[in-house]
Amino acid sequence: MRSVDVVIVGAGLAAAAAAKRLVDAGVETVILERTELPRHKICSGILSPRGHRFLLENFGPLPREALHDPTWCRGVTFHFPSMVSMPMDFFGGSTPHLHRKYSDYWAIQRSGAEVHDRTSFVGLKDKGDHVLVQTRQNGEPVTYRARQVIGADGPSSHVVRAIYPDYPKQIPWFFVGQKFHDIIDCPLSPDYFHFWFHPGLGHYTWSHARDGRQIVGVGFKRGDNFARKHEVVQKYLEDRHGVRLQPPADDHEGCGENFGPSLINRYVFGKGNVMVTGQAAGFLNMIGEGMSCALHSGAIAGEAVVEARRRNRPVQELYRRMIASEVRRTTDQWNPLKIAFDRPHEADFPAALMALSWTDRAKVLRDIWRFVVLYKEFKWGRQIASLALQRPIIGGYSMRRWL
């Protein structure tokens, strides 16, 4: 049995940020990853300015091999069924287009933590003063004894399932898939991430250039047909935007996503000596970018461990108090009052809207409403409205909804 201060499950950006905080404070840390590193990561790769600043401040400049081509993204363009398009540059300037296979590996290496890849998480037992983590390493059972465990293993987190077996049944799940096409002709600017507010295309539809090809991505309720959804989007892009693409290559990919927690403040942060962070906890920005909040929430998880040891306090007590700032920042992005009267995003939607004519503004607002109605079946509307009213009263969002 290996004894260690902290075990982190998962080897993504949240894990790297947590490990960096821990190692810098002298806390012995082991990262577990089920596949061999560097490993492939399903991700569009467009990082927000806030995430870029975090990487620069904590890990240094990104190496060239950690970037796709085009290497930079200027901002986001929203497209609507009325054919109004709204390009919005990021406030902080252009941001990197991460190649997650190599950017994650680079960050993990720079964290200084010990890494055990080809090690699958099986389960855990919290004994009060330590946690036993069961794994399989190259097919053989291996147990770790740790004072704390951090689950940073993505939306379908096995750590979450180990401590809250019923949690996955309590939230709606979506499938997000992307296919890659050689380009015949694409009028869409390669400098932007393109997103469609169109209820006929799916719950989350996007496209952008990557490594000489065009990504066409779509998100929808899990259980629907990916190939059929993708065909609808590809035909729409050709008919309405003049995007002519070759048939998709064979390397399409997809994964399950937990979109709901950030909208309705239903995060899961763990219990006892087990913390959950990153997208496993439910963090996701409005355009589906989870890397920046993974980095910041991961760092907070690491800081909570360090602070708990320094003050001899329960780690959950401190983690939940400290993570409230990241909850505010992330859930604010889905808050209609913050969107209307503040600047919760990293691109200026209100300014872009006001730059349109009165007619186009009316079209955009109508189209957004029709898109939002697509989510009616999940009964999020009243919850979002309640949170919007709660925010100015208590200065944040209630911890009582968190697991």
Image (cartoon, rainbow, N blue to C red):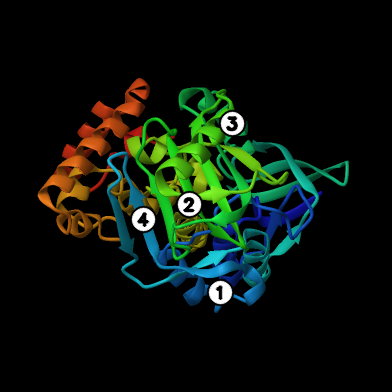
Inspect the image, locate mark 2, and give the three-letter code of the amino acid beneath it. Gly
Q: Are marks 1 and 4 in contact (CB under 8 Å)?
A: no
Nearer to me, 181 or 391: 181
* Closer to viewer: mark 1 or mark 3: 3
The image shows residue 348, relative to residue 263, as above or below, that is below
In three-dimensional space, the C-alpha distance between marks 2 and 1, rounded to whole angstroms, equals 18 Å
Position above or below: 209 against 72: above
Label of residue 59 in the image: 1
Mark 2 is surrounded, within 10 Å at the Cα level, by few (under 14), some (14 to 19) or many (20 or more) other residues, namely many
Q: CA distance from mark 1 to mark 4?
A: 29 Å
Q: Residue drawn at (65%, 43%), measured in percent from left and top? A: 247
Label 1 crowding class (10 Å Cα cut-off): few <14, some 14-19, many 20+? some
Cα–Cα span, label 2 and label 4: 18 Å
Three-letter residue code for mark 4: Thr
Q: Which residue is mark 2?
A: 290
Coordinates of residue 19 in the picture (x, y in percent): 60, 63
Q: Mark 1 falls on what kind of element?
A: loop
- In this view, the mark in front (2 or 1): 2
Residue placed most toward the observer, 111 or 329:
329
